Amino acid sequence: MNGTPLSRRHFLGAAATVPLAATGALALGAGTARAATDSAYVMCYFTESPNMLAANYGLHLAVSTDGLQWTPLNQNAPVATPTAGSLGLRDPFILRKQDGTFVVLATDLYGTDWTYVSQYIHVWDSTDLRTFTGYRRMKLHDMDTHAWAPEAFWDAGRGTYGVIYSAVNDSGHNVIMINYTADFITAGDPQVFFDPGYDVIDGDLAVGVSGVNYLYFKKNSTLVGARSTSLDPGSFTEFSTAVSHNGTEAPTLVKSLTSSSTWYLWGDTWDPNGVFYAWQTSALSAGTWTALDQKTYTQPLNSKHCGIQPITSTEYANLVAKWGTPTWNRLKSYNYPARYVRHSNFVGRIDPYAFDPYTDGMWTLVPGLADSSGVSFQSVNYPTRYLRHYNYQLELDENDSTTAFAQDATFYRTAGLADSSWSSFRSYNNPTRYIRHSNYVLRIDPISTSTDQADATFYVGY
């Protein structure tokens, strides 16, 4: 749900979402709907930033071929927006249904008004995630409490879908509830799905993994797993080691499409910074996770509380063709992968993600002003300004159309000096010098040591 931590309010939602084993795409168990050739992923999310400049409570999509590096679609703008209830969503989730089409669920909440109570969730149908039809709200209960962080799965034993969500029931604390539905239009009576006797939110399921079902959830700002050999309400028992990164929620389980045993666990910080962290395991049954190096994954800009669903290569291509990829880039530091290139007071530097104005870290990589085979970095929020070196330090300056400016603002993109799969940038008019950071400030320097090489290496992504 991505909001205040449980210590600051009695109820709190956060939707987990998984690429859903349950949805079928992730789980390899019987009774799941799985595309025959899943080879990529789609992520759904909403957006916020530290000062809420990026706050947008519509449905956003991004795609990935490995489930780790993500490309936002539609310029990171929403592809659908609720038209009823609060007129906003949080915690979206995508399920591939048994017929191969998709259903999208989301919390009915605009912004961070935690006093707003809705017993409904937003629902859309989609054949291909390029069009969204049949928008409606589905009522889940009559209790005086929320219905947050919805996720759905196919229950083969019952021959119907289950919708799990966070709510406060008669116990007085947050539990994971469930309603069964055949059509995502009307829901059966609410039942308690998981109540270990303490606050739990953000349930995320992986169904039918070697005969076992796994439920991950938020407990005391950590991510914890429970498991059961059935999908019956009340059958799950906690078993895993807790993982966290300074307060984490919204667990999302993702099965690798290239390794039969590898799983990833995504988590989101509860505050508006919305920094995602990821862990990996080679056996979901072990219940232990190893934190991934942030160099290995990049979340979509300003994304919050995601859901991830496997898709086919055709679906991936069709999504990109429909919504387009960003016309801008972000640059991540190699040896400080929590930091991104940005301008601040017109000085080039690397700062921790997330920051506002978030547009300070967005760049249009244009043909080099002095040599079109090179590259120049045009600011997105100051489009008449470019990164250029002045006394070897990088500044964001107005293009005065002089030869000197064009040369100072032109760089040659090369294979990363510390990692050839990343990038480094050599100065046009000082060809022995490369862009690097020093005390987090960008400058051009000669590169000789391994530290210099790491300082001069960047990931060009989104």
Image: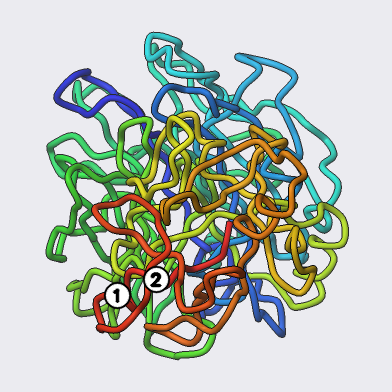
Q: Secondary structure at mark 1?
A: helix
State how far apart marks 2 and 1 are (Cα).
6 Å
* Most foreground residue, 341 or 136: 341
**Quarter the C terminus occupies:** bottom right
Tell me if mark 2 has few (under 14), some (14-19) or many (20+) residues whose alpha carbon lies within 10 angstroms of its own: many
Amino acid marked by disc 2: Ala
* Most foreground residue, 310 or 383: 383
Q: Which mark is residue 224?
A: none
Amino acid marked by disc 1: Asp
Does 295 sit left or right of 246 as displayed?
right
Q: Is residue 259 above or below residue 69?
A: below
Q: Provide residue 80's location: percent of width, then percent of height.
A: 75, 35
Q: Is residue 68 above or below residue 438?
A: below
Q: Are marks 2 and 1 in contact (CB under 8 Å)?
A: yes
Scheme of colours in the image: rainbow
- Which residue appears at 43% of the width and 18% of the height? 112
Please identify the quarter of the rendering in which residue 55 is found: top right
- Which residue appears at 60% of the width and 75% of the height? 413
Q: Provide residue 176's location: percent of width, then percent of height.
A: 33, 40
Residue behind mark 1: 452
Q: Which mark is residue 456?
A: 2
**Quarter the N terminus occupies:** top left
Number of numbered markers: 2
* Most foreground residue, 426 or 28: 426
Tell me if mark 1 has few (under 14), some (14-19) or many (20+) residues whose alpha carbon lies within 10 angstroms of its own: some
- Which residue appears at 67% of the width and 43% of the height? 76
Q: Provide residue 403's location: percent of width, then percent of height.
A: 73, 54
* Most foreground residue, 230 or 290: 290
